[in-house]
Amino acid sequence: MASTSEQLTSTCAHCQRDIPSSNFDLHFAHCSRNLGKCVHCGEMVPRKLIEDHYNETHAPITCSLCSETVEREAWPLHKSDNCPKRMVTCKYCELPLPALDIIEHEDVCGNRTDYCGTCRRYVRLRELADNHQCSIPDVPTHPLGSRDRGTGARDERPPPRRPRNNGPHKHLIFIAITGLAVLIGSIILHRS
């Protein structure tokens, strides 16, 4: 059974913790000499590490993209949503662009057209992305070889366009091949 002197505690004026009365004098001397209270979070930190604690936990961060100084608590939000120079991908062509340019780019890019195989029309990419509702033209009920079709009558539908380059991979391959060609050409010219 514990004695009553071991159960008594006193509150340290420096760290505000309850300390057993038997250890209080030793604790207070150590606490006031070696520990300091962080003015930002109230955490007790060794005095020689207070500056490191501030730099790692509370110091504002300068964004490497936009050079804006951001509070550390707001840094994840700034990095993912608020930085005007963060890279964002165009929803139409998947080209990565800075966020401040994406609206203008998507206005232009969304107005390009692509062939809709269902309704057999060229439709703006913006409409295709916004769940384009096809108005399917009337399909003739007569067979292709019918006399009523007419001789030499051409189909009014436009021919499908060639598929566009969907992604940066072909562009990167083109750049790599071009670089290789320049390298080989410079080696050949150097030997001559």
Image (cartoon, grey):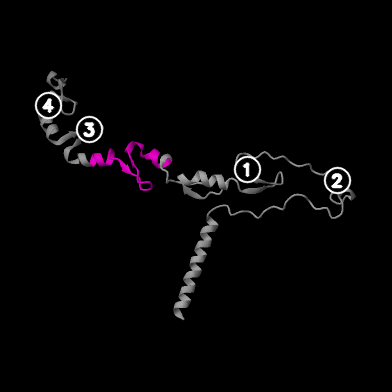
Residue 30: tell me if it is visible: yes
Q: Is residue 133 above or below residue 6?
A: below
Of helix, strand and loop, which one carries label 4? helix
Whether residue 61 sits left or right of residue 143 in the image: it is left
| Location of mark 4 (residue) | 24
The amino acid at mark 4 is: Phe
Could you say which disc has been placed on residue 142 in the image? 2
Mark 4 or mark 2, earlier in chain: 4
| Location of mark 3 (residue) | 39
Could you say which disc has been placed on residue 128 in the image? 1
x, y percent for residue 82:
41, 40
Give the Cα distance between marks 3 and 2.
85 Å
Of helix, strand and loop, which one carries label 3? loop
Q: Is residue 44 above or below residue 147?
A: above
**Which span is picked out in magenta?**
52-80
Tell me the quarter of the image containing the N terminus. top left
Give the Cα distance between marks 2 and 1.
31 Å
Labels in figure, total: 4
